[in-house]
Image: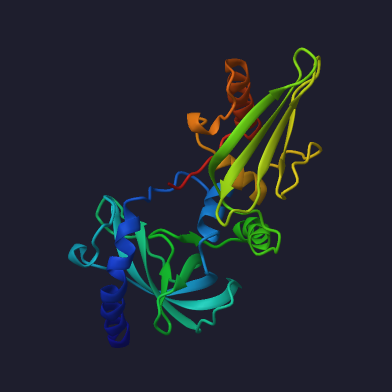
């Protein structure tokens, strides 16, 4: 315990302030993590680690700034079981801070020997990691591993869809027939990768739409399947309302059609549900 206490104090001093800013953004989990929850955790993580907790210690409140009400900050020592994702070498033993809910007596859960999945980055010192969010620790299970595996595969693929930042332009153009139109929506992305959405309306037919991840605007493109990275990039990051400045049509009818098609795409994608916030 002497070794444990020494490293507890050293790590708390080095990481407590780093963990504090994000703490206020976290909320208690309400059920199992959704697909969006898992991508939220995996996407910014340089390291995804399966580990078994060996020791835990609750930090005093004065050593744990920014912890949300009802939570406490633990110093944890754990044994590395597997590096699920990441190329950075890690040791057999790792140390980190994590925020956990406290019971009505102010006590944390007993996590010793529990296996967990950690979403983290290096803390810059051997054997120490920093979680990408104060609560970026999930209890490991085969079911969780099965859901996480395809997400990590998609995130590391060479053709992984870029992060969507918002709507750059949208333009609706009427066709030659009554009820015929084509709306093209161009999205801003992290790194300026091309992403466009096309909505086609034909008389007496249901509207169809699709997304293109290349510079070619493809009328044959199809919507992304739900709970895929392509779906997440759009469904979870389109704005709730179409920015007025993005609607570049001049006449009222075309502007109204662009608005309608934007809402149609949102409805088709469905809600981006999260149990973590």
Vertical relation: 161 (above or below) 120: above
Residue 55 in which image quadrant:
bottom left
Q: Can see residue 113?
A: no
Q: Position of 199 compared to 92: left or right?
A: right
Which residue sits furthest bottom? 3
Residue 62 in which image quadrant:
bottom left
Q: Residue at x 56, y 40 (%)?
A: 168
Which residue sits furthest left? 62
Q: Position of 99 compared to 172: left or right?
A: left
Colouring chosen for the image of the structure: rainbow
Q: Residue at x 26, y 78 (%)?
A: 9
Vertical relation: 111 (above or below) 69: below
Q: Pick whichever, 126 or 118, lies toward us.
A: 126
The spot of residue 240 in percent (x, y) is 50, 32
Q: Position of 45 compared to 151: left or right?
A: left
The spot of residue 73 in percent (x, y) is 30, 63
Q: Residue at x 61, y 25 (%)?
A: 258
How many callouts does the rendering have?
Answer: 0
The spot of residue 266 in percent (x, y) is 60, 31
The spot of residue 108 in percent (x, y) is 32, 60
Q: Can see residue 53?
A: yes
Which residue sits furthest top? 178
Vertical relation: 118 (above or below) 257: below
Q: Residue at x 58, y 36 (%)?
A: 169
Residue 204 in which image quadrant:
top right
| Quadrant occupied by the N terminus | bottom left
């Amino acid at each position: 315990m002497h070794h444990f206490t020494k490293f507890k104090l050293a790590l708390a001093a080095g990481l407590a302030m780093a963990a504090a800013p994000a703490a206020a953004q976290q909320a208690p989990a309400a059920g199992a993590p959704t697909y969006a929850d898992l991508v939220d955790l995996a996407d910014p993580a340089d390291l995804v680690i399966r580990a078994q907790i060996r020791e835990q210690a609750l930090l005093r409140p004065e050593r744990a700034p920014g912890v949300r009400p009802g939570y406490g900050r633990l110093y944890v020592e754990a044994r590395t079981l597997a590096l699920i994702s990441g190329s950075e070498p890690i040791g057999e033993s790792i140390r980190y801070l994590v925020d956990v809910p406290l019971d009505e007596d102010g006590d944390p859960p007993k996590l010793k020997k529990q296996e967990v999945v950690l979403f983290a980055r290096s803390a810059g010192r051997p054997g120490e990691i920093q979680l990408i969010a104060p609560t970026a620790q999930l209890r490991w299970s085969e079911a969780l591993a099965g859901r996480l595996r395809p997400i990590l595969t998609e995130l590391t693929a060479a053709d992984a869809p870029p992060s969507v930042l918002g709507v750059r332009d949208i333009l609706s153009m009427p066709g030659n027939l009554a009820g015929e139109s084509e709306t093209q929506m161009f999205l801003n992305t992290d790194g300026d990768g091309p992403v466009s959405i096309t909505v086609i309306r034909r008389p007496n037919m249901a509207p169809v739409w699709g997304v293109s991840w290349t510079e070619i605007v493809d009328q044959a493109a199809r919507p992304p399947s739900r709970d895929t990275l392509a779906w997440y990039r759009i469904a979870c990051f389109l704005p709730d309302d179409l920015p007025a400045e993005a609607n570049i049509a001049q006449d009222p009818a075309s502007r109204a059609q662009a608005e309608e098609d934007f809402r149609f795409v949102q409805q088709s994608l469905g809600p981006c549900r999260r149990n973590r916030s």
